[in-house]
Amino acid sequence: MINLVIIDTGCANLSSVKFAFDRLGIQAEISRDLAKIKSADKLLLPGVGTAIAAMKNLQDRQLIETIQNATQPMLGICLGMQLMTEFSSEGNVETLRLMNGKTELIPNTGLPLPHMGWNRVRYAADHPLFAGIEQDSHFYFVHSYAVLPNENTIATSNYGVDFSAAIASKNFYGVQFHPERSGKNGAQLLKNFVENI
């Protein structure tokens, strides 16, 4: 059985991520225990709230170095994805630096912020994270900050401007949307992370 650990970032959506795996019949444990995190087969880094508060939580829990040195596949969700980049302009805070890129306020095109609700996602063809998911499928978003497309972008969405819906570098993957709130497409993506990555 796969040893799946959801890193306890102290953010509010941890249990909804765990329930999404429960629905798939996949056991996942929420933990901040460094030994458990290091011995996991795969890791999830969920997050909601502000980058500055989340980084403080990670620092207080002495999780930053363990996350940065992780060699197993890790999936960041929403704020968790943004933390994988180098810097967030939300509080002007240095983030985990797991890959290039920075998180910035979605440029003002006259659309209300936060960007909230269902939106289409266009992904790089044949990416294993999106196996079995139709191109231009809808996923559920809630965010005001985004990573604009860069060399690590594997999927985009558009809210006035294109932004990264998913990013990947080495063993680190991130999605801006909430797979745990995205119905069957989100469930398929979580299953893909466990089985294909």
Image: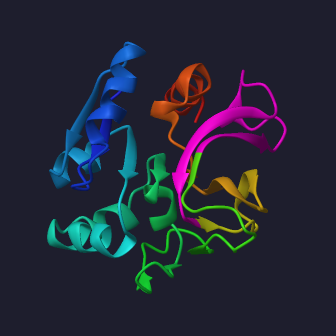
> Looking at the image, is 86 positioned above or below residue 192?
below
Query: Which residue appears at 74% of the width and 41% of the height?
Result: 121
Q: Is residue 15 left or right of residue 107?
A: left
Q: Is residue 75 left or right of residue 54?
A: right
Indicate the quadrant where residue 115 lies.
bottom right
- Identify the image quadrant of the C terminus: top right
Residue 36 screen position, x and y as percent: 20, 44
- The color scheme shown is rainbow
Residue 171 screen position, x and y as percent: 54, 52
Span of residues in magenta: 117-145
Query: Which residue appears at 52% of the width and 78% of the height?
Result: 86
Query: Which residue appears at 21% of the width and 55% of the height?
Result: 10
> Does 159 lie within the magenta span?
no
Is residue 149 among what the camera can see? yes
Residue 32 screen position, x and y as percent: 18, 51
- Identify the image quadrant of the N terminus: top left
> Does 132 lie within the magenta span?
yes
